[in-house]
Image: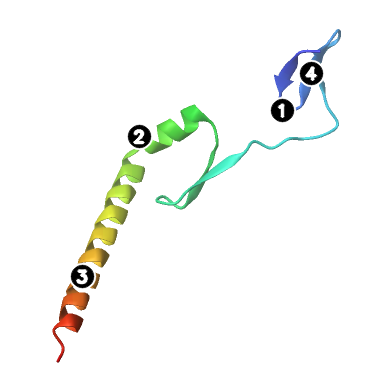
């Protein structure tokens, strides 16, 4: 029988549901703090979104600032007598 998706198959009398439900895999976005369906179109649409791009830029600037702060602290620590 051909598969129709979500556990359904197509029989002689039309679509028939299987005895189980299979969930779709999900992917977590570390920048946006949300779960997305793990398929290429959904991920690409999310990655092109304004909020995702803003959150990525914010995260990169936070990492850069943290690195600069740590470097400044190391320079001060090296200058101690």
Could you tell me residue 54's position as x and y percent?
Answer: 29, 47
Label 1 secondary element:
loop
Question: Could you say which disc has been placed on residue 48 in the image?
Answer: 2
CA distance for labels 2 and 3:
33 Å
Query: Mark 3 near mark 1, Cβ–Cβ under 8 Å?
Result: no
Q: Residue 81 versus residue 13: which sits nearer the camera?
A: 81
Residue located beneath label 4 in the image: 9
The earlier-in-sequence mark between 2 and 4 is 4
Q: Residue 68 versus residue 46: which sits nearer the camera?
A: 68
CA distance for labels 3 and 1:
53 Å
Which residue is at 86% across, 10% downward? 13
Query: Of discs 4 and 3, which sits in the foreground?
Result: 3
Q: How many numbered callouts?
A: 4
Residue located beneath label 1 in the image: 6
Residue located beneath label 3 in the image: 71
The earlier-in-sequence mark between 3 and 1 is 1
Query: Which image quadrant for residue 25?
Result: top right
CA distance for labels 1 and 4:
9 Å
The earlier-in-sequence mark between 2 and 3 is 2
Query: Of discs 2 and 3, which sits in the foreground?
Result: 3
Q: Residues within 10 Å of mark 1 (few under 14, many from 20)?
A: few
């Amino acid at each position: 029988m051909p598969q129709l998706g979500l556990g359904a198959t197509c029989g002689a009398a039309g679509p028939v549901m299987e005895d189980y439900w299979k969930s779709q895999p999900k992917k977590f976005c570390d920048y946006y703090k949300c779960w997305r369906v793990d398929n290429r179109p959904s991920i690409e649409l999310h990655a092109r979104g304004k909020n995702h791009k803003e959150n990525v830029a914010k995260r990169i600037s936070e990492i850069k600032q943290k690195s600069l702060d740590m470097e400044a602290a190391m320079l001060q620590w090296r200058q101690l007598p």
